[in-house]
Image (tube, helix red, strand yellow):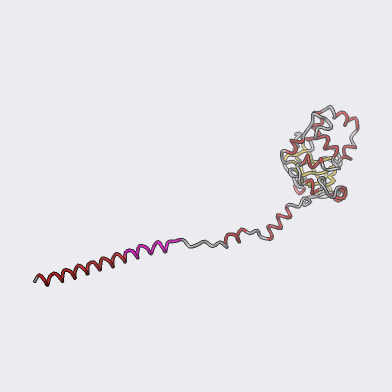
Amino acid sequence: MLSTKRPALAFVGLTAATLLGLTACGGSSTSSSPSSSSAPAPMSSSAAPSSMAPSPSASSSASTAMDPARDLVGPGCAGYASQVPSGAGSVTGMAQDPVAVAASNNPLLKTLTAAVSGKLNPKVDLVSTLNGSEFTVFAPVDDAFAKIDPATIEALKTDDATLSKILTYHVVPGQITPDKIVGTHKTVQGGEVTVAGTKDALTVDGANVICGGVHTANATVYLIDSVLMPK
């Protein structure tokens, strides 16, 4: 009787062990499946770069926007270009420098440059101010200053208050392009200037715009044929 029970118990034990082993294997297989299925799919490296590539039209627009002659207006622009076709004082050259530096390189603006840099009157030096912010500048050419009585020019050499008023009356805060220039604008001096006319026939308080829309690094310049006097 005892011999019969022992093989039976051994068989039951072996069967139970086998079932437990199978159950353990099944549990291990089930737990490892989610980890493999939850792994993130590799990102495509081709999509992002292609979406960031500039379109041909965008590149063309950027190129056009950088053209320093894009806004030129006035009957004298061709004459200016022929007088100063290249170099730092040309339309292209002036676009590289702040306005006081750009004006000093322009052979048409020698008298104005002397007036704003302390050479006409040591007490009046506006170079840092003009280079330090954005402006619209109505710049009288040398022939414009030649219209003024020499005695007046001589007096300005010692009358710094009057010279400062005259010079700052030619400067308007902010850059104004030719398509928005017509109208009345408050100057740095405090008075107002009035621009009238059409694209190639603009006037500023009666002075003719020779060539406007000349860009510098921080200003838009309008060359004019007369010196403006504060009202």
Which residue is painted at 69% across and 57% down in the image? 59
Does the magenta-highlighted stretch encompass residue 225? no
Q: Position of residue 73 (x, y in %)?
A: 81, 49
Residue positioned 79% across, 36% down in the render: 169
Residue 173, picture quadrant:
top right
**Residue 147 visible (yes or no):** yes
Question: Is 119 in front, or is 12?
Answer: 12
Q: Which image quadrant: the C terminus?
A: top right
Residue at 84% across, 27% down: 158
For residue 50, side relative to residue 157 (left or right): left
Q: Is residue 30 magenta?
A: yes
The image quadrant of residue 124 is top right
Q: Where 53 sits versus 156, above or below?
A: below
Q: Position of residue 161 (x, y in %)?
A: 80, 28
Residue nearest the viewer, comparing 13 with 221: 13
Specify the farthest residue to the left. 1
Is the stretch drawn in magenta largely helix, strand or loop?
A: helix
Front residue of this view, candidates 32 and 125: 32
Residue 231 seen in the figure: no
Horizontal side, residue 226 vs residue 174: left or right? right
Which residue is most to the top?
158
Name the residue rendered at 8%, 71% in the picture: 1
Report the magenta residues as a range: 27-39
Q: What number of labels is visible?
A: 0
